[in-house]
Image (cartoon, helix red, strand yellow):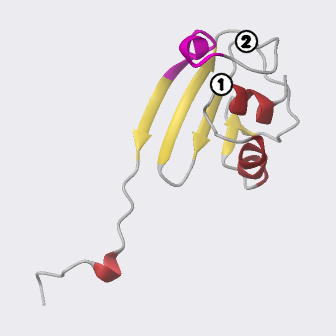
Amino acid sequence: MRLDKYLQVTGLIKRRALANEACKLGLIKINGTTAKATREVAVDDIIDICLARRDMSIKVLQLITGSSLKKTIRHEYFTVLKDIEKTVVDDFWQDNPDE
């Protein structure tokens, strides 16, 4: 299965177009190498996803045969190795106590 489709079907990224764009921007890596959306996903691949609000690493446990998955069984297809939620801080609007 293609990387962009895998990310969309597992629910890691909401839409396939967004997954495709993230790949184009170099935000998705497989086994440490920047991956294109057309790259085939294999069992035991480590996928690193670095988005604006989240850094995530997953390990592929099994491949998806159909075009969709129930939300209740998505966790059977990958395991989360790292999930760090980023906080976006805009220093311009923060009160500066030093002033």
Q: Which residue is mark 1?
A: 10
Residue 8 in the figure: left or right of residue 81: right
Above or below for 61 versus 20 = above
Residue 51 point in image, percent of width and height: 56, 49
Note whether 92 is above or below 67 in the view shown.
below
Residue occupying image coordinates x 70% and y 9%? 62
Residue 43, label in figure: 2
- Image quarter for residue 32? top right
Mark 1 or mark 2: which is in front? 1
Q: Where, by quadrant of the figure, is residue 61 drawn?
A: top right
Q: Which residues are magenta?
A: 70-80
Identity of the residue drawn at 71% across and 48% down: 18
Question: Looking at the picture, how far across and down is residue 95, in whole percent?
Answer: 19, 80
Give residue 96's quadrant in the image: bottom left
Label ID, residue 78: none
* Relative depth, front residue between 69 and 7: 69
Q: Amino acid at mark 2?
A: Val
Could you tell whether 25 is left or right of 84 in the image?
right
Residue at the image position 41 percent from the left and 39 percent from the top: 84
Name the secondary structure under disc 2: loop
Asked whether 81 or 17 is in front, the reply is 17
Q: Secondary structure at mark 1?
A: loop
Location of residue 75 with respect to 50 vertically, above or below: above
If the image is split into quadrants, where does the N terminus sit?
Answer: top right
Packing grade of label 2 (10 A; few <14, some 14-19, many >=20) is few
